[in-house]
Image (spheres, grey):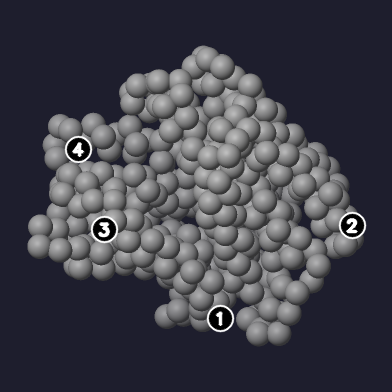
Amino acid sequence: MNLSRNLRLALFAAVYFAQGISLAYFLTFNILYLGESGYGPKDVGFLQSLLLLPFILKIFLGMFSDAVNLFGLGHRKPYILIGLIGQAIIFLLMPLISVADGLGVYALAALLAYLGMALYDTSTDGLALDTTPEHERGLVQGLMTGSRALGILIMLVLGGQVVETLGWPWYFYTSLILVLVPLPFVMMVTEDPARTQRREFQWSAFKSLARGSVLLVGLLGILYTLTLDGVLVFLSDYLRQTLEVSMGGIGMLVALSMVGRIVGAVSNTWVTDKIGHRQSLFVAVALAFGACVGLALGGSTAIIGLMGLLFGVAYGYYSAVYGVVAMDFCDPHIAASMFAIFMMFVNIGTAGGQSVGGILTERLGFSGMVLVMGAINLINIPIVYAIFRRSGRQAAESTV
């Protein structure tokens, strides 16, 4: 491997690790921080909903990155730098913001921090699309997905210890330091137009979104996240109420599932590029179905823990291989924009899974809901066949 390739892979892993650090805050510690400050579910829920806004803006951030060479430094590097440094500054200021008299300033700061993450996330995706050869897309997506899960896992463990021993200010300072881990790698990157797959931005390229194969890739993203996130949201409650697992035990099982997610993503780094993208999607569907059946039939904490690990493997693998296929269908004229749109479908599936999962759990119980979700996941089998038949893609089917 040459230096540029090593640097590129290290950059992708480091940025997604930083994203995992940030997500641990936004999805977990932000809720705990506000709860300790006296805010109830209504206020916290409103803020969490507000933080979805940057994910909507990701499409426009991607368009800006595709179209504008910022300060002559490139289409990706300056945006990654702005996002990372901007988020680090917000983490530095967070302990100085009082939430005693209202959430206005804090909410604005959290929104800006999330926007910084959205900016470096979509710009890094664009850089990956610009520079990754097709036969390495499994490697890159596996590294990204696994590094993000590793960041979440490390911060869930480390962050709790920091808060308990040093207090909330040091939680934010620790996040600041870890978010800046990618900075040296970004500074070493020089965007070379002669060594990129990026093409000049064209509005007409958005017509490709109407292609049947592209729409099917979007549907694939909706269904896989609807299935997996629909199950994941209600797993902890099932463990607590039905199996009467302690909060500490639930935490250990969630951590075990996150380890599985890392294993699934990392295994994708060599499996997908070896067996081909279509075949790898079938592996993902099979893993998810097996994990759902196992969770539905598991009657003890030990079995649920084992199936939770398998579910994590399925989640990590599925996420990574979907990222690979999304890369396959991105138009190089609007690469970051189009990848952000594919991720929008993923977010739609996540939101839908929470709603559908709740309805099914009320009517069928947790086990019944999981079995239905596993069956919904199987719809992706004919969808995968249709995607590659309609697109006529041969390169993604070849083994390396």
Mark closest to the chain's N terminus, 3 or 4: 3
Residue 389 - label: 2
The Cα atoms of the two marked residues, 2 and 1, are separated by 32 Å
Q: Is residue 230 above or below residue 214?
A: above
Instruction: Please indicate whether residue 223 sits to the left or right of residue 32 in the image.
Output: right
Q: Tell me if I can see residue 113 in this picture.
A: no
**Residue 273 quadrant:** top right
Determine whether the residue tagged by mark 4 lies in a helix, strand or loop.
helix
**Marks 2 and 3: in contact by CB < 8 Å?**
no
Residue 67 - label: 1
Determine whether the residue tagged by mark 3 lies in a helix, strand or loop.
helix
Question: Foreground: 297 or 110?
Answer: 297
Hey, what amino acid is under mark 4?
A: Val
The Cα atoms of the two marked residues, 4 and 1, are separated by 42 Å
The Cα atoms of the two marked residues, 3 and 2, are separated by 48 Å
The quarter in which the N terminus is drawn is top right
Residue 163 - label: 4
Q: Tell me if I can see residue 47 in this picture.
A: yes
The Cα atoms of the two marked residues, 1 and 3, are separated by 38 Å
